[in-house]
Amino acid sequence: MVDLPGVRARAALAVSALLVVAVLIACASFGCGPQVHKTLALRRVQTIRLPGVEGRIDPLAVDLRDRRLFVAALENNTLEVVDLNTGKPSIAMSTD
């Protein structure tokens, strides 16, 4: 391998410049700064009571098409299915 003087330094500079350009393109495409946090942050839109669910709930999944929320009630060993249109639980399935 031939190591010409300054070749590695120029290569490192080129990689750094490419990284800066990639970040600038990403900022231009997706937005950077505080306004992103305002639009992408999670916010509470409603509170849904889960009667009979005690202890920890952890994994959540959402079905946007059918507007359902799946909640794993770990202490109860159940999977709770919530209808987001009505804001009420619709099904509780045992995982035992």
Image (cartoon, grey):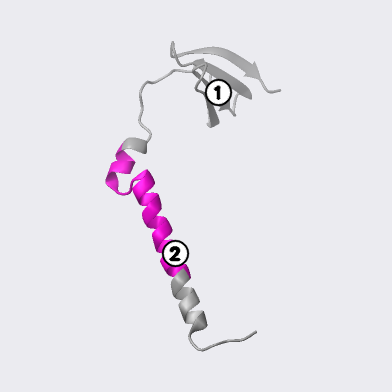
Question: Which residue lies at the image location 45% right of the left edge and 71% below the top edge?
Answer: 14
Span colored in magenta: 15-38
Of callouts 1 and 2, which one flags the residue occurring earlier in the amino acid sequence?
A: 2
- Which label sits on residue 52? none
Q: Amino acid type of disc 1?
A: Phe
Q: Nearer the viewer, residue 17 or 47?
A: 17
Circle 1 crowding by C-alpha within 10 Å: few under 14, some 14–19, many from 20 = some
Q: Which residue does the numbered mark 2 point to in the structure image?
A: 18
Helix, strand or loop status at disc 1 = strand
Asked if 61 appears above or below 84 in the picture, the reply is below
Residue 70, magenta (yes or no):
no
Picture quadrant of residue 95: top right
Q: Amino acid type of disc 2?
A: Leu
Circle 2 crowding by C-alpha within 10 Å: few under 14, some 14–19, many from 20 = few
Task: Point out the residue furthest to the bottom here.
Answer: 5
Expressed as whole percent of the image width and height from the top left, the position of residue 79 reads 60, 22
Expressed as whole percent of the image width and height from the top left, the position of residue 93 reads 64, 17
